[in-house]
């Protein structure tokens, strides 16, 4: 594997991670879940 191929793989991986982070952020926004609830979820109600 030459250096150019390695650099391309690294770039593709970083791009994929950033895309997933953006997708997760948009998903949470669409679900209208406040960040505070994500960090501190309310306790589950046990019946």
Image: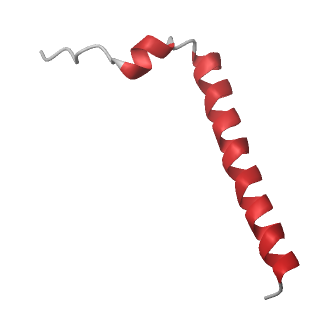
In the figure, is residue 6 to the left or right of 24?
Answer: right
- Residue 26 lies, in percent from the top left, at 68, 25
Foreground residue, 12 or 41? Answer: 12
Q: Quadrant of residue 43?
A: top left
In the figure, is residue 39 to the left or right of 28?
Answer: left
- Residue 19 lies, in percent from the top left, at 73, 43
Task: Give the residue at the far right of this rendering.
Answer: 4
In the figure, is residue 40 to the left or right of 11?
Answer: left
- What's the image's color scheme? secondary structure
Foreground residue, 34 or 9? Answer: 9
At x 64% / y 38%, what residue is drawn? 21
User: Residue 17, relative to residue 28: is it above or below?
Assistant: below
Q: Quadrant of residue 46?
A: top left
Q: Quadrant of the N terminus?
A: bottom right
Foreground residue, 13 or 2? Answer: 2
Task: Give the residue at the far front of this rendering.
Answer: 3
At x 72% / y 54%, what residue is drawn? 14
Task: Give the residue at the far bottom of this rendering.
Answer: 1
- Residue 7 lies, in percent from the top left, at 81, 69
At x 74% / y 64%, what residue is drawn? 10
User: How many circles with numbers are drawn on the protein?
Assistant: 0
User: Residue 45, relative to residue 16: is it above or below?
Assistant: above
Q: Quadrant of the C terminus?
A: top left
At x 63% / y 27%, what residue is drawn? 25
């Amino acid at each position: 594997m030459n250096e150019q191929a390695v650099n391309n793989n690294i770039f593709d991986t970083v791009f994929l991670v950033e895309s997933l982070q953006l997708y997760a952020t948009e998903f949470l926004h669409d679900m209208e879940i406040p960040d505070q609830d994500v960090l501190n979820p309310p306790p589950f109600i046990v019946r």
